[in-house]
Image: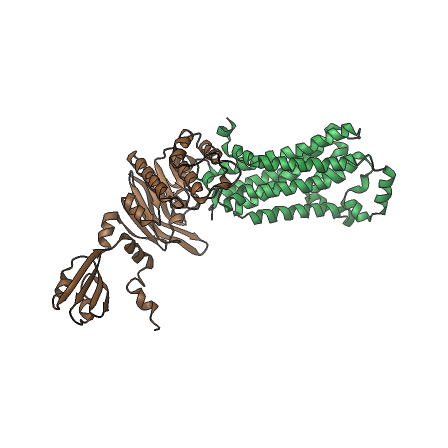
Chain colours: A green, B brown
Amino acid sequence: MAAETVPVLAGVMREQRRPLVLWGLALTAVSTLYIAIYPTMGIDEMASMVDNLPEALINALNYDEIGTAAGYISSTVYGLLGPALLLIFAIATGTRLVAGQEEDGTLELELTAPVSRTRVLLERVAALWCNVAVLVAVVAVVTIVLAAVLDLDVTVGNVLAASTGLLLLVLGFGTVGLAAGAITGRRAIGLGVAAGLAVLAFMLNAIAPTVEAEWMTIVSPFSWFLDGRPLATGFDLSRLALLATVPVLAVAAAVVGFRRRDLMV
Amino acid sequence: MAVIRTEGLVKDYGKVRALAGVDLDVAEGEIFGFVGPNGAGKTTTIRVLLDLLRPTAGRAEVFGVTPVQGGPSLRARIGYLPGELAMSGRRTAGDLLRHLASLRGGAGGNRIGALSERFGLDLNRPIRSLSKGNKQKVGVVQAFMHGPELLILDEPTSGLDPLLQRECLDLMREARDGGATVFMSSHVLGEIEDVAGRVAIIRDGVIVDVDDVGALRSRAGQVVELRFSGRVDIDEFRNLPGVRDVTLDGSTMRCMLHGEPDALLKAAARHRVLAWSAHERELEDLFIDFYRGPSDRRQPEEVTFDGR
């Protein structure tokens, strides 16, 4: 049934089952590890450790609130490791699903099937988004469960808010990678553009407080995601809307570029 | 009605001109052979027909519409076998074929079993463990399974063993007998001769010849060998009408003859002829003539040994 209405999406999801399970397990392990050790770290020890770090590093890692559960999870799982792992997955997968499979030729039979280019592209974008959503949901569930088990001061609503932000952040760069690959037909360009922009956005957000440059937080999606402290304060729709513009614009550009160029060259 | 028609089709890749004005006219219900050396533009032409590539200039039409206009509904009428079939992954051959059928709204799904059996394809094997020949079987099955009106086959028999090559050619004949049109490129001239009605020869991005296989064969000419009782002068034969590539080895003269043998025979009759033979050239020889191109077509050996 699903295969008949969205055959391209269904096909990709079948291929992705295995990597998705492996990535889900990896993210579960990392998130569990980091959140589970929080109660064992004394607040005083943490504070003295943070005091000994240079201020620039504290700012860069958002360690200024590491004494609270929300601050700690935000600095580790949601602000650093989660985005890093999810971005690696999303950019690698997004660039492979169009440009990579076009370059290795495996897309040829799909592109010559009675399915429009727009549909191939959109269903492949949808497949990427579904994959990322599953993995972000894994992180969210692990966080919610551990917060309950360990009796941490983090509400379910705030975890959902932070997870939505994380999802949109990762979809943004993953879709930029897919789009850059779809527009050029070269996976390497997609990887370079998306990974470069992600690292740049992370760096701008990290050094902005130290160099006191507000423009850096204005242009960095990492700032849009983290500045509102979603794990402590909950949903901030205007920031989420801003984050959502990235994947939406990337898809629009990808459709325009993919429809007009020569494929399989 | 022309199923495939191209007029002055030009395709540039950057500064490289891959097609320099291809004119093709493939009629409904025929098996049309498309031959030429590697890099001549066969695959480029085919990819324009499937709307993977957009023409730089000129026009291509399939069933009366351009591939861009036709879009998905045009491709639903086509079965396509790529020249370099790339498939990978853990899923089985059956999974992939069912997926390809689902891209066609399910069309052809019910013929996967029968066609696979005909080609001895094990549907439960994972794609990535399949040999080149077995992957080619998957390609053949997916091209034919939905009973398309037009088959565009890029080197269809490559990688198949002789028995399955014949099976594949049979499948093409059956499709034609059922009213389908087949447009196939090939390197194997024997199979083109076997199955195709007309042939187009492409070289350097232009069609250099289109004709019936039979007519091409007759144009391929004959190789004539004459053994004389004594020495003869090569110049007596070199400029005769229809005679080409004259070589003299002692008292034996060899040449290529196109058309009437009258002038050659009269020239030969001035001497005492001890033995003669004339045999039809293979179609393959003709293709090699075309492949070499006009510049070096006449006497390539001379060029090679020039510096001797």
Q: Quadrant of residue B142?
A: top left
**Split into 4 quadrants, where in the image is the C terminus of chain B?**
bottom left
Residue B44: image location, x then y, percent: 40, 48
Residue B285, placed above or below residue A7: below
User: In this view of the protein, can residue A192 be seen by the observer?
Assistant: yes
Q: How many marks?
A: 0
Residue B5: image location, x then y, percent: 32, 44
Farthest residue, direction bottom: B308
Q: Nearer the viewer, residue A252 or B126?
A: B126
Q: Quadrant of residue B157?
A: top left
User: In this view of the protein, can residue A221 be seen by the observer?
Assistant: no
Residue found at x 36% / y 55%: B204
**Side (left or right) of B142 relative to A94:** left
Residue A52: image location, x then y, percent: 85, 47
Residue A31, placed above or below residue B295: above
**Split into 4 quadrants, where in the image is the N terminus of chain B?**
top left
Residue A234: image location, x then y, percent: 74, 31
Farthest residue, direction top: A1
**Side (left or right) of B243 relative to B158:** left
Q: Nearer the viewer, residue B175 or B90?
A: B90
